[in-house]
Image (cartoon, rainbow, N blue to C red):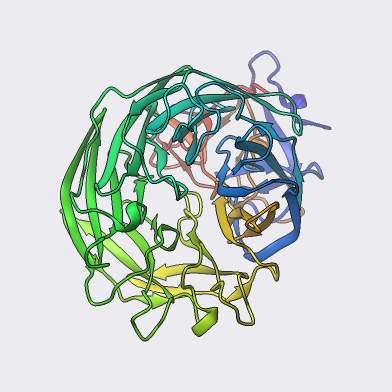
Amino acid sequence: MANLSDLLPQGGGQNNTDFVADGNITSGKPVIFTAAGKAAQVATSTASGSLPLGSRVTVESSASSIMRLQCTADPHNTNRWLVSYYNDSGTAGIRFRFVIRSGTSLSVGNEINSGGVSGINNAYNHAIAFDPSTADKFVMLFMPGSNAPSAYGTAAVVGTISGSAGSESISWGTPNRFETANFDSSNGTHNRFQAIGTTGNYLAAWANDPSAVKMRVVTVSGTTVTAPGSTTIPYSTQPRGSSEFIFKVNPYDSSKALLFQNNNSNKNLYITDIALSGSTITATSSGNAVETSYTYENNYYNMNLVYLTSTKFVLAATRDTNVSVVGQGFQRIGNLSGGSFSYGSWVTHNVLTGDNALKYSFMQMLDNSTVTPDKWITIWTTNSSGGSYDKHPFGRIGSYSGDAVSFGTNTTMDSYAYQSIFVSKADDLDGHFLLLGDNGSSSAYVFLGKTGGTSSNLTSTNLLGIASGAISDTATGTINTWGSRNEAQSSLTIGSDYYVQDDGTITTSSDGQLIGKAITATQINIKDYTG
């Protein structure tokens, strides 16, 4: 047998084929077809982290002024990121490039300039969210520039990607300027626009001085953007500098979100629990104090929030300059149960002090995603006032046990000086992430890293079938393949569809790959081969 197509059922009869085992195989377990033509049991393995991974690659080197970086992982292609930045040279506007990973190497596509597009031209702040259900489609939240037909305020527009890798283009729908009040034009928009599950709704947030954080649900159908609900203020206190806040939609329960912000009047930290229902935003528990003993830095890049489970999360913030741990970044575990918050102890992720501390620097904490829920990465740059590590980016992999945070080695990511950074993690099992940084004038760069995690040998194309019995390593045994029936199961629910998961279990969770239907408590009727 040379390939999977040889397994096509003949006349609808049983399709049982003998294979040599690559490793021990347990009776009733799903197996993959290896490159050597053998059968291996579906299983996971531990993938270690690497900070960084590969070499720095130039994205832009001839800008007049480069700022407002964004980096967004493509959920439909874990090897692709969309990087964007504001460039005021030529026809000023947001520029886009796609960055593709192949192993540890990166390639950068052509530049796409939105500055000549009516309604988007000379756009200022922006944030991007890919459509979770449709490939090559994203939504951009932005402040229309002074040259737009209706300038300033808050708008959203759909972008559709076409073209081959390296020479992509973007076509635009009609922007919807649904809010006329400006959000702070001096700052970027970090993770302030997110899809709400796969409903076609997105949660947008912004702030305009001296108001509080404003939120609104944006709905996308095709290339049309609407804002059917109303603008909501979940917590009435102004964030510092109109920018120091972060929100995340719960990846395990898209009817919920958290808003984490700094209070402008006292520099303390507060969190708000938010319920989402259609276009309605409701603060179910508003302005809970996270920290009142210390004050925190006036820079939204120095705040972040990452979900770990549906009820557990990790918070990060940077202490202000009037405390003994000047500028250092701290993290703590938070829990939300029955409307009540509880926290673990603060732990610093930055061991440097003085000029090498975090003061007025940039910090990003990557979403762990539901694929690698036990690890996250924190990236930060050092103080711009000098020192041995002036503006160098550092990284540490974080993990947790209960309510305790721990960190891996404090690693210098690059010896180059960065004015600002932005990072985005792919939704893959190795936790690959892309860091985008700039030198504050003409150039921007990217490089890779990975947090590590749990890696599976199962892909979208190599699922072979289920072992009819136990097979020892290098021995030959029978695999029930497509169109066959496996009789080595237990406690199945008759009539239910069963799916192979990345860890080799066979369950009714549709997150895995469909293998077949239970016809008795011990038998799965394996589906036909469909290519």
Instruction: Describe residue 528's horizontal placement relative to residue 519 as left or right.
Output: right
Q: Looking at this view, is 242 or 98 the one in front? A: 242
Q: Relative to 475, is 345 above or below? A: below
Asked whether the viewer can see residue 495, the reply is no
Residue 428, image x and y in percent?
58, 48
Q: Looking at this view, is 476 or 504 the one in front? A: 504
Q: Quadrant of residue 257?
A: top left
Q: Quadrant of residue 311?
A: bottom left
Residue reaching furthest front? 146
Residue reaching furthest bottom? 324
Residue 76, image x and y in percent?
58, 34
Instruction: Locate the C terminus by quadrant.
Output: top right
Q: How many marks?
A: 0
Q: Relative to 284, is 163 above or below? A: above
- At 45% across and 75% down in the image, what residue appears? 406
Instruction: Locate the N terminus by quadrant.
Output: top right
Instruction: Describe residue 18's horizontal placement relative to residue 391 as left or right.
Output: right
Residue reaching furthest top? 11
Residue 184, image x and y in percent?
38, 46
Q: Looking at this view, is 411 or 237 the one in front? A: 237
- At 62% across and 59% down in the image, what residue appears? 450
Residue 457, image x and y in percent?
65, 48
Q: Looking at this view, is 400 or 323 the one in front? A: 323
Q: Relative to 374, is 76 above or below? A: above
Instruction: Describe residue 269's horizontal placement relative to residue 153 as left or right.
Output: left
Asked whether the viewer can see residue 400, the reply is yes
- At 32% across and 30% down in the image, what residue appears? 179
Q: Quadrant of residue 239?
A: bottom left
